[in-house]
Amino acid sequence: QKEVEQDPGPLSVPEGAIVSLNCTYSNSAFQYFMWYRQYSRKGPELLMYTYSSGNKEDGRFTAQVDKSSKYISLFIRDSQPSDSATYLCAMSPMRSVWGKLQFGAGTQVVVTP
Amino acid sequence: NAGVTQTPKFQVLKTGQSMTLQCAQDMNHNSMYWYRQDPGMGLRLIYYSASEGTTDKGEVPNGYNVSRLNKREFSLRLESAAPSQTSVYFCASSEWSGTPVYEQYFGPGTRLTVT
């Protein structure tokens, strides 16, 4: 069983809808949670991060962590065609400079005009 | 700033051939990484270099070797390519910037096919 599970999609939504993405994990030691966005044929880029439990909002994006359920979510409000990308969750047990991130498989999102 | 650059962008190899993937960063980062990305598998760490002069194995190191040539450059070598190494390879770098997480900056990727 993978340490991080993420539905690969694709998830297709009309422009303006709310996009809801999530990951589940099995390692209770994970404390740092990140969301990366990857456009087609590009490298991933960090979108948001949260530490431990709680919510974090950045513009149209909200990240939530529920450590008791081992479940993290990313919500995109007022979705735009430019949000069409693959979204990967990533997590680590500590603030790790050594690259020990565990990535989900990524969810492909398509926002149709 | 170019960020993280990778060469080549595409490569087709025959089974048993060798090649080196090149990566360079101009952000003065200490740490560098090599990942492979396969459908349904996400990004998996092959090797990483915490700082110049050090390298260590990641999750899937078999069949690969790395060299941290200097602070800027980190290369990945396939000595005898196998079809199972068909993948997209990403190089990344990171440095402490005062935030709670170490953001990793990724290159554009190398698409490798082994026939």
Image: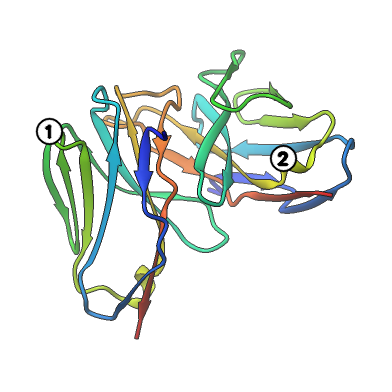
Coordinates of residue B92 in the picture (x, y in percent): 53, 38
Residue A104 quadrant: top left
What residue does disc 1 label?
Answer: A68
State the colouring used for the structure image: rainbow
Name the residue: 82% across, 36% down: B81
Badge number at residue B85: 2
Q: Is residue B20 above or below residue A40?
A: above
Crowding near the residue tagged with mark 2, few <14, some 14–19, many ≥20 C-alpha atoms within 10 Å = some
Mark 1: amino acid: Ser
Quarter that holds the C terminus of chain A: bottom left
Return the chain for callout 1: A
**Farthest residue toward the front?**
A1
**Farthest residue toward the bottom?**
A113
Name the residue: 36% across, 31% down: B102
Name the residue: 76% across, 30% down: B77
Return the chain for callout 2: B
Is residue B22 shown left or right of residue B3? right
